[in-house]
Amino acid sequence: MPVLSCVCSTPNSLLKKWLRVIGVDPKPYGSHSLRRGGATAAAALAVRVHILQRHGRWASDAVYLYIQDPNEARLEVSRALLGAPAE
């Protein structure tokens, strides 16, 4: 049976190719952008963290580093520190 290997750069190469196609500079993006975006989107849809962690094969709490809080939630911190009323 032939052994099929996965070229690690394939997802990265494909992402950069499609970014160029739509006119976006691919330099600041990599396949980890997709990993972070996927984790953030799943969290925003209330996917439980332990399921997200298993799906993304995170063996540690590093999953939390990939989830970006929504802008509104981050602004709440700034408002609270400044004593501004919540919107």
Image (cartoon, grey):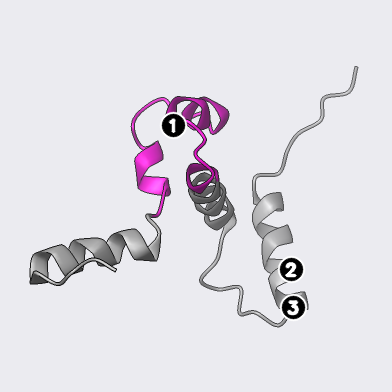
Magenta part of the protein: which range?
42-68
Question: Is 1 on the left-hand or right-hand side of 12?
Answer: right
Task: State the quadrant of the C terminus.
Answer: bottom left
Residue in the image at 40% along x and 54% along y: 68
Check residue 49 in the rendering and tell me which mark sits there, or answer none.
Answer: 1
Name the foreground residue: 31 vs 51: 51
In this view, 34 is above or below 75:
above
- Please tell me whether mark 1 or mark 2 is closer to you in this view: 1
- Please tell me whether mark 3 or mark 2 is closer to you in this view: 3
Residue that numbered label 2 is attached to: 17
- Is residue 47 in the magenta section? yes
In this view, 48 is above or below 84:
above
- Is residue 51 in the magenta section? yes
In this view, 25 is above or below 63:
below
Residue in the image at 71% along x and 51% along y: 10
Residue that numbered label 3 is attached to: 22
In this view, 19 is above or below 13:
below
Residue type of the residue flagged with mark 1: Val
Q: Residue farthest to the bottom?
A: 23
Q: Residue farthest to the top?
A: 1
The image position of residue 80, as x and y in percent, is: 14, 63
Q: Secondary structure at mark 2?
A: helix
The Cα atoms of the two marked residues, 3 and 2, are separated by: 9 Å
- Please tell me whether mark 3 or mark 1 is closer to you in this view: 1
Badge 3, how many Cα within 10 Å: few under 14, some, many 20+? Answer: few
The image position of residue 70, as x and y in percent, is: 40, 59
